Amino acid sequence: MNDRHSLLDTVTNSFVPIHGDGYKFVFGAAVITLFLFVLAPPLGWISAFFTAACAYFFRDPERVTPDRDDLIVSAADGTVASVLESVTPPRELALGTDPVTRVSVFLSVLNVHIIRAPVGGRVIHAAYVPGTFINAELDKASEENERQAFVIETEEGQKVGVVMIAGLVARRIVTFIDDGASLAAGERIGLIRFGSRVDLYLPDGVDVLGEVGQTAIGGETVLAEFVRKKPAAAKRRKARSA
């Protein structure tokens, strides 16, 4: 009895839920598949494969976000494509012209495409920018592609920019939040349909922990942390003890 229950749990847990935004696509593909099975069974099997692939694309697994407010987690699943330490923030973020650090994560069509908040805080700015659809792996995609930008301000006043960028295949960015929304780190903020990229713009005073080529898991992988300044009293005690 216990063995069967354990096996059932294993099978059940292997199925990842589909995000609500994907239901219409999966349903439409399933209807087409049924018609093709009636009219031309070989085509029905091909359509069934694409229906399963569509369901796989829109999967929405639960994530466990580290419970520390000094950490910055990846906003997306994918590969860390670049880490640039002196970049001027894009105008749509309205963060000024002082150089910041940019960490970019590239999402292939096989990755989970739910985008999550890298930090907890309040959305103080949001902007949509129309654009082209060149390969999201290219650096110029940050300036030329269609994108949706958010700025999240933490309770300590640090501002983190998040830019969701459409790619060569991606043609639609869906957002789940509005300007002024309060967020928890790891909370779902949007979805990019098919291959794409997410840029994080990090303020001065962070240690970047992510490495180029690293596989990132949205809402879980720590990409950076805020550097905590030691209180002046603690510094004086340390100086006296020395």
Image (cartoon, rainbow, N blue to C red):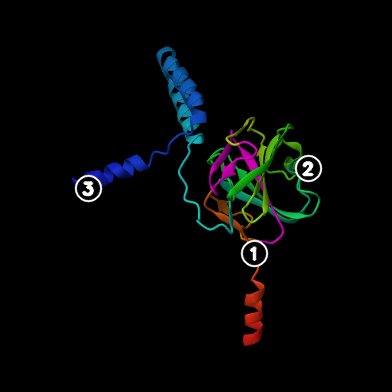
Q: Nearer the viewer, residue 214 or 49?
A: 214
Tag 2's secondary structure? Answer: helix
Tag 1's secondary structure? Answer: loop
**How far separated are the C-alphas under marks 3 and 2?**
58 Å
Q: Nearer the viewer, mark 3 or mark 2?
A: 2
Instruction: Tell me the number on the disc at residue 227.
Output: 1
Describe residue 28's horizontal placement relative to residue 199 as left or right: left
Specify the farthest residue to the top: 39
Q: Nearer the viewer, residue 77 or 48?
A: 77
Which stretch did the figure color magenta? 178-206
Q: For mark 2, what is the residue? A: 91
Q: Is residue 24 magenta?
A: no
Percent position (x, y) of residue 134?
Answer: 71, 36
Q: How many marks?
A: 3
Look at the image and tell me whether residue 242 can be seen: no
Percent position (x, y) of residue 45?
Answer: 43, 24
**How far separated are the C-alphas under marks 1 and 2?**
26 Å
* Vertical position of residue 86 compared to residue 6: above or below: below
Percent position (x, y) of residue 199?
Answer: 67, 46
**Residue pictured at 48% horizontal, 22% vertical:** 29
* Vertical position of residue 19 compared to residue 28: above or below: below
**How far separated are the C-alphas under marks 3 and 1?**
48 Å
Percent position (x, y) of residue 57?
Answer: 51, 35
Give residue 205's quadrant in the image. bottom right
**Residue pictured at 69% horizontal, 36% vertical:** 147
**Residue pictured at 44% horizontal, 22% vertical:** 30
Q: What residue type is disc 3 on?
A: Asp
Instruction: Tell me the number on the disc at residue 3.
Output: 3
Describe residue 194's horizontal placement relative to residue 203 as left or right: left
Q: Label 2: few (<14), some or many (≥20) within 10 Å?
A: few
- Along the polypeptide, which appears first: circle 1 or circle 2? 2
